[in-house]
Amino acid sequence: MQLNSTLTWLVDAAGASPGADRFLAEVGAHLIADNLPLAGGALTLAVPHPIIARRTWLWRAENGEVIEAVGFAPADAAQKDSAGDAGWRWLAGLADGMVHEDVVGPGSDGPVLSWIGPRQFTETEIARLREVARFAAAPLAALSARATLIATLEAYLGRRSAARVMAGPLRRDVGETIRAALLYADLRSFTALSETSPPAAVIAALDAWFDCIAGAVHAFGGEVLKFIGDGMLAIFPVTGENLGDACNAALRAVTSAQAGMAHLDGIRREQGLPSLAFGAALHLGEILWGNVGAADRLDFTAIGPAVNLVSRLEGLCRPLGRTVLISGAVARETTAKLIPLGTHPLRGIAAPCDVYTVPDGQSAT
């Protein structure tokens, strides 16, 4: 039995695979072409991610379908077994044969290639699968390095921004003007909390706050662009000409965050901890989305009058006694019921701003 098709592909083309799912499907198809009896397979990679400890892709030979299963951090043995069992249950019923598994590369924590056959693999077939694992080491190392880079950038920048950074050169003059609904949110009385609480309690409060507000942003298709002390700037980019979709998504996100913070405050009160009041503002406008900074130290961010306005608008939450304030630009594009609060000047902004809030808005404290 020869592996001409599989080994040739691994040497010449596998390194260009766009992702682990395609790599697994391609190597499986080539193994079948080289007369290896396969019903399915799996590829597991460890990833540097704040939540996910490992990612496993599972491939079915009968239709070429690939799905993904994840194991969440902390990566204890029970979780690993649970994730693996869930994945193999998807392949269950394909065959009554055995599973062959190889750790690819040196050490015990490298990528794992697993194969399931319609019958017991012969010794010759096992030797061929081990040879495939040896030839797969180089392309999988490249694939793992690329996945590590992408996961790291997404953790620090967000998915859209990470993709933009990956696609562009590392220069200060790289950026684009986009339209987006902006959400700026900020904790109230954070300085006092920092002065009166142990550092660990302050970090725990910040993490809980950011989990709530960022989770709401991500749930409705937005992206956290920047954490600024105890504040956060998020964007909901406009796609096409429909401005209302981005505005409605931002409104749903901030409403969800209000509900989440109310629940969190209930838990904190039960623990004898102070509530975490916050203010949030929404605006719609154009932003320059790209690289700024020093010649050799860049930041990927958004700047422009719209960013200035949304941050100044959030500053009105306390004087107006509201948790959420919404600019006239957003109000004009949404069908949501809003309460007008009049026109107000904003510090550093030339024109006054029409200001709205959501019904039953909570009082800022």
Image: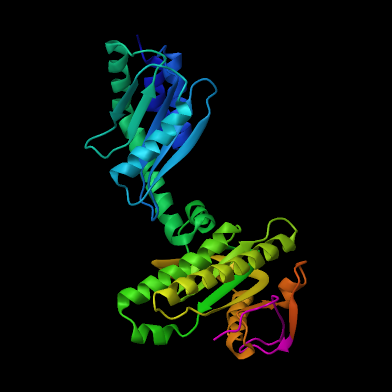
Q: Which residues are magenta?
A: 342-365
Q: Position of residue 293 (x, y in %)?
A: 45, 71
Q: Is residue 77 magenta?
A: no
Q: Is residue 17 visible?
A: no
Image quarter for residue 219? bottom right
Q: Residue, x 29% and y 46% (percent of image)?
A: 76
Image quarter for residue 121? top left
Looking at the image, is 311 positioned above or below residue 48? below
Q: Does residue 347 appear to the left or right of 33 in the view shown?
A: right
Task: Name the one closer to the observer, 44 or 269.
Answer: 269
Looking at the image, is 99 positioned above or below residue 288? above
Tell me the quadrant of the picture where the C terminus can be found.
Answer: bottom right
Q: Residue, x 47% and y 35% (percent of image)?
A: 21
Q: Is residue 305 visible?
A: yes
Q: Residue, x 40% and y 53% (percent of image)?
A: 51
Task: Name the one closer to the observer, 295 or 96.
Answer: 96
Name of the residue lying farthest toward the top: 1
